[in-house]
Amino acid sequence: MPSDPIPPEPPRAGECLSRYMARVERPLSRAQVLAAFSRYSLDQALETAKVVRIRPGIFVAAQHARDPRCRAAALHMWIPRGLVSAQTALALFEPTWQVPGEDVLVVPHGYRVSVQPNLTVRSTRTWPAHRTVNGVPTVTPSNAVLDAWALTPVRLAADVVYRALWKRIVSAPELATDLASRPRLKRRRELAELLGYFLDGAQSPMEVIAKRDVFVGRSFSEFTWQHTIRARRRTVVADMCHERARLIVEFDGRAFHADEQSWARDRERDVLTASLGYQTLRLTWRDLTKRPEWCRSMVINVVQQRLRG
């Protein structure tokens, strides 16, 4: 808990506690609150739920309680020796990161932390590399991803890795290096296998999903991955290509890059390859993850029709 009871800035004339905390957009300790407001004001703000206790002795405006910056700052104020990790830390590295309700704090082995709702504490004998973001000590991005992997439900864990790689918060080699130093990480072998696709040259998370989970088996044995095509003095690299059927399959990462320039480039590529007789099928992140059977069926059907005709 910080020893300095002075609030970050003084309240304005006539400003009530709830409006003040909504304006400063950060957590305050009880001492900081009581340095500028009465105990009655704090009790009233809590009773009306305009201010909430986010951690023991730490308060924040209700509308900011789910903000990862406030959550991380509150953890640091409560346990200064801890390091924020997992998806709360990832949201500090990348502001667009969507954070679930659970926070993760790394503390030295033997350091006791009281049980709190929506908090997982990981103790370690080997203090990890760390950095400071917005005044909050955190683990490195790669260790944040590893902790998130271990604590996220199995069906969602791979998506954490895919998003972190796509947003370039961390690289596959960095993850692999830190994974080697954590032999007891939950589902470690599965994560190593997943990273192997990237280390072997996969260009995107969507390519890994397609290669690992969707387009598997004999029906897709004639497809080549990252297939190079020369098109009117340009080189086009197709995600998947069936050369005999002159069919290209591209993976559109709408969930990750939906800017107009990227889409314009994709459409120009389609026109260039069509001039050489190729048909292009574009599949989205949602297609691959929500309806893989449909993706397989459509691709097989188009291959068969083109080979017949």
Image (cartoon, helix red, strand yellow):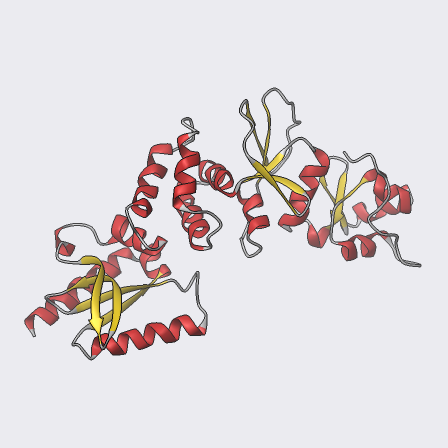
Residue 210 in which image quadrant? bottom left
In this image, 119 relative to 41: left or right? Answer: left
Relative placement, left or right, of 233 versus 89 is left
Percent across and percent down for residue 69 are 65, 49
Q: Taking 268 as reference, is 4 above or below it?
A: above
Quadrant in the picture for the N terminus: top right
Q: Position of residue 143 (x, y in %)?
A: 49, 38
Which image quadrant: the C terminus?
Answer: bottom left
**Number of marks in picture:** 0
Q: Which residue does the image show at 84% across and 42% down from the upper left? A: 32
**Which one is in front, 214 or 211?**
211
**In the rendered view, does 252 fall on the left or right side of 259?**
left
Above or below for 255 versus 271: above
Q: Residue at x 16, y 76 (%)?
A: 277
Residue 120: x and y in percent read 57, 33
- Asked whether, in this view, residue 9 is left or right of residue 128, the answer is right
The x, y position of residue 21, in whole percent, is 79, 52
